[in-house]
Image: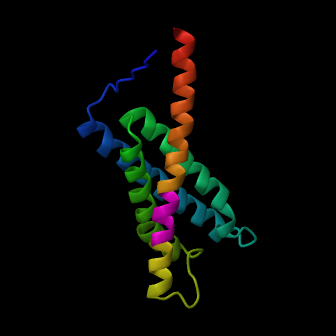
Amino acid sequence: MSLTVRSVWSLATAFPLTLLGAVVLVLAFDTIGALICARNPRLAYRNLWPLQFALYLVIGFVAGVTVLDPRYVGAIGAVTGLVEATLGWAITWRIGPGRIEGANTAAFVTVALSMTAVGFGLSLIGYVIFAQLARVFMAAQH
């Protein structure tokens, strides 16, 4: 039995909208997290990583729903990770919690590459969760 799923949107619409939504979500998280941590010095920004990782799983799941292709899901996750590592870090740096003593170009490049890989990998895990749930629900309908 073959299960076919179609998106309501064309890829030309779904991909940029999903990417924009993912970037806005992650930058909003960075901004809100930095503001909360700046107002509460006992809460270290670096301790928010489980929520950050969960966001990438959600991004992969939602991207799976909208673009239905793991290649595009991975691209959305990777680009979002790169934006978070650059613009997101700049936002948290400006607010305060993102300031790292002794940060240099090598540290910046390492973080940017790492977050690109993390965004890619976690979004694909989110996609796999979507694909498995879709299979189960579609099989139950037949």
Verify whether residue 38 appears in magenta.
no
Q: Is residue 22 visible?
A: yes
Residue at x 53% of width, y 10% of height: 141
State the residue lying farthest toward the right: 42
Q: Horizontally, is 36 left or right of 56 in the view?
A: right
Total labels: the figure holds 0
Q: Horizontally, is 43 left or right of 141 in the view?
A: right
Q: Position of residue 54 (x, y in %)?
A: 61, 49
Q: Main secondary structure of the magenta part?
A: helix
State the residue lying farthest toward the bottom: 102
Q: Is residue 10 above or below residue 42?
A: above
Q: Give the quarter of the image for residue 52.
A: bottom right
Q: Is residue 138 above or below residue 38?
A: above
State the residue lying farthest toward the left: 12
Q: Is residue 89 visible?
A: no
103 or 109, nearer to the observer: 109
Q: How is the image coloured?
A: rainbow
Residue at x 43% of width, y 18% of height: 2
Q: Is residue 125 above or below residue 7?
A: below
Q: Position of residue 56 (x, y in %)?
A: 53, 51
Task: Report the span colored magenta.
Answer: 113-119
Residue at x 55% of width, y 19% of height: 137
Residue at x 36% of width, y 37% of height: 67
State the residue lying farthest toward the front: 1
Q: Is residue 67 above or below residue 82?
A: above
Q: Position of residue 100 (x, y in %)?
A: 58, 83
Q: Give the quarter of the image for residue 132.
A: top right
22 or 106, nearer to the observer: 106
Q: Position of residue 45 (x, y in %)?
A: 64, 68
